Image: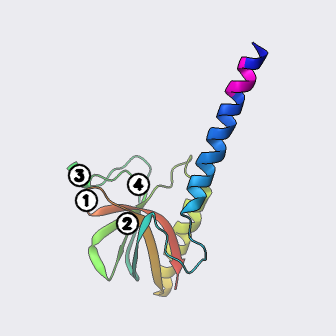
């Protein structure tokens, strides 16, 4: 039984080691390099909307369950979303604050959003960068 547990533990450790290496293999080498897992858009924030948790927006493939909605002047029909739920990562609040500051001060931003597998006009924000 002890040998079986060691083998199972070794297999699990090898799996985690290899999966971590695969995730790091395609990470950007520098901060200037593009992120291979997202799409970059640039512009000035022309709409900044925050709403209560659980209030969805849109319908069908356009349905978004988020608390923050942002549009950029470069493509005002595209809506970028961010969840600010109690269990959301702390970085989401920082990104929301950064986008609010960019909106108030009319600063250009770069948003990196998920690669869409559909033709939806609302996309989840993954990173925010002030230019």
Residue 59 rendering spot, x and y as whole percentages: 22, 50
- Alpha carbon distance from label 1 to label 4: 15 Å
> Measuring 55% from the left and 74% from the top, which residue is drawn there?
98
- Label 4 sits on residue: 66
The mark that comes first in sequence, 3 or 4, is 3
Question: Which element type, helix, strand or loop, lies under badge 4?
Answer: loop
The mark that comes first in sequence, 3 or 1, is 3
- Alpha carbon distance from label 2 to label 1: 11 Å
Mark 1 or 4: the one toward you: 1
Task: State yes or no: residue 81 in magenta.
Answer: no
Residue 112 rendering spot, x and y as whole percentages: 45, 70
Mark 2 or 1: the one toward you: 1
- Label 2 sits on residue: 80
**Residue 103 visible from this viewpoint:** no
Q: Secondary structure of the magenta portion, mostly?
A: helix
Q: Are marks 1 and 4 in contact (CB under 8 Å)?
A: no
Q: Which mark is residue 120?
A: 1
Residue 43 rendering spot, x and y as whole percentages: 39, 83
The mark that comes first in sequence, 4 or 2, is 4
> Crowdedness of circle 3 by 10 Å Cα count: few (<14), some, many (20+)?
few
The mark that comes first in sequence, 2 or 3, is 3
Question: Which element type, helix, strand or loop, lies under badge 1?
Answer: loop
Q: Are marks 3 and 1 in contact (CB under 8 Å)?
A: yes
- Alpha carbon distance from label 3 to label 1: 6 Å
Please report the bounds of the magenta region as a residue range.
4-8
Q: Is residue 38 above or below residue 64?
A: below
- Label 3 sits on residue: 61
């Amino acid at each position: 039984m002890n040998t079986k547990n060691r083998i199972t533990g070794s297999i699990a450790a090898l799996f985690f080691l290899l999966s971590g290496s695969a995730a790091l293999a395609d990470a950007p080498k520098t901060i200037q390099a593009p992120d291979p897992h997202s799409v970059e858009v640039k512009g000035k924030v022309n709409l900044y909307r925050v709403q209560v948790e659980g209030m969805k927006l849109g319908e069908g493939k356009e349905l978004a369950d988020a608390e923050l909605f942002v549009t950029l002047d470069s493509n005002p029909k595209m809506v970028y979303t961010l969840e600010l739920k109690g269990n959301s990562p702390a970085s989401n609040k920082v990104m929301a604050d950064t986008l609010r500051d960019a909106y108030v001060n009319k600063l250009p931003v770069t948003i990196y959003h998920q690669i869409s597998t559909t033709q939806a006009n609302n996309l989840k924000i993954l990173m925010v960068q002030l230019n």
